[in-house]
Image (spheres, rainbow, N blue to C red):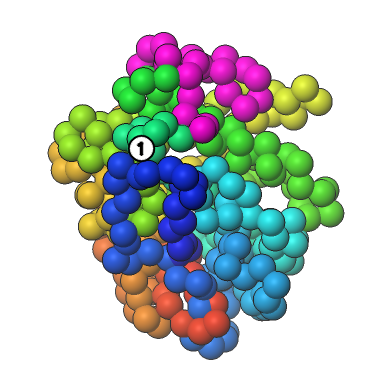
Amino acid sequence: MRTIARSVAASTVMAVVMLAGAALPALAKSGPPSKTQAVTTGNDISWPQCGKSYPSGQAFGLVGVNGGLANDPNTCFASELAWAWSSSGKSAPGAQPKASLVVNTADPGQVTPTVGDWPVNNTDPNGATATDPYGTCSGADDAACAWQYGWNRAIQDMLWLVGTPPSAGSTSPAAYPWWLDVETGNTWETGSIGLAHNVADLQGMVAAFTNTSERTPSGALLGGVITVGVYSTSSQWGQIIGTGASLGSLGGLPDWIPGARSASSAQANCSLTGFTGHVSITQWFGRPYDGDYACP
């Protein structure tokens, strides 16, 4: 889902903001799917659709949790999640489940002055202490704090879901595939060390989503996610992660690839080589909503 980058804060000078050349569009659809496409095509919506009508007749829906940045919520999340649960659902090989969630990602470690939510320890928004494989975070621009920042953003994303009214669908993070929206329109570090920090940041997010140890005070599991995937393009992924990087937990994640201009082109793009793993979803641009094709 194409996003629109915003500044980290009005008073914050960004160390680096790489503008996306292929970010997610304000979701569009080039007409209803044919009968043969119906079980494998869906739509994705997010904060740009607030106050607008939502698509209809989708086989599956993908909903943005954030409001344009990695650290702010989509104010229409509840109604958009309910829309996704109204999908016809998985009914054929390769088809997606009724509802999936998409989260913005970023690594503002090089921003000066330091952004307000940059971690200074290993305590996350749920009040729990994370086991950081890169060591202790003390507020520096290093791999330990980059990993913790990613972990914190994922925990916050899941807390926003847990706080969504039950009528909007399941509030269990494990009930959804989660997609990491990795685009150059948000803030990332640069240079060889910075790119390694970006990898740590995304690894922290994957670790948080897949963890099975953390719960909210009410007992809800924050984690246990079976599928975590990546929405990006090979070009943007290369700029953010670099080439030849050791991906660790990012290796083998399914990919969701934009760029097509029609449903048939999106279907053909299922044969493309992914940048982390196999291509699971392809997206096509249309009006007024993007379409998404579930690859076999």
Say few, some or many: other residues with alpha carbon within 10 Å of mark 1 (under 14 / 14 to 19 / 20 or more).
many
Q: Is residue 25 left or right of residue 110?
A: right
| Residue 213, position as x, y percentages in the image | 61, 19
Residue located 72% across and 66% down the image: 83
In the rendered structure, does residue 136 fall within the stretch colored magenta? yes
Q: Is residue 35 left or right of residue 105?
A: right
Depth check, front residue: 99 or 204: 204
Judge whether residue 28 can be spotted in this image.
yes
- Residue 199's image quarter? top left
Residue located 54% across and 77% down the image: 289
| Residue 108, position as x, y percentages in the image | 38, 38
Depth check, front residue: 68 or 237: 68
Q: Three-letter amino acid code at disc 1?
A: Val
Judge whether residue 60 can be spotted in this image.
no
Residue located 22% across and 49% down the image: 238
Residue located 61% across and 36% down the image: 156
- Residue 44's image quarter? bottom right
Q: Is residue 54 above or below residue 197?
A: below
Residue at the far front in the pictured view: 11
Depth check, front residue: 173 or 184: 184
Q: Is residue 274 above or below residue 220?
A: below
Say which quadrant the C terminus sits in: bottom left
In the rendered structure, does residue 117 fall within the stretch colored magenta? yes
Q: Secondary structure at mark 1?
A: loop
Count of marks placed on residues: 1
From the image, give the main secondary structure of the stretch colored magenta.
loop
| Residue 155, position as x, y percentages in the image | 59, 32
Residue position for label 1: 111
Q: What residue range appears in magenta?
A: 116-138
Q: Is residue 19 left or right of residue 177?
A: left
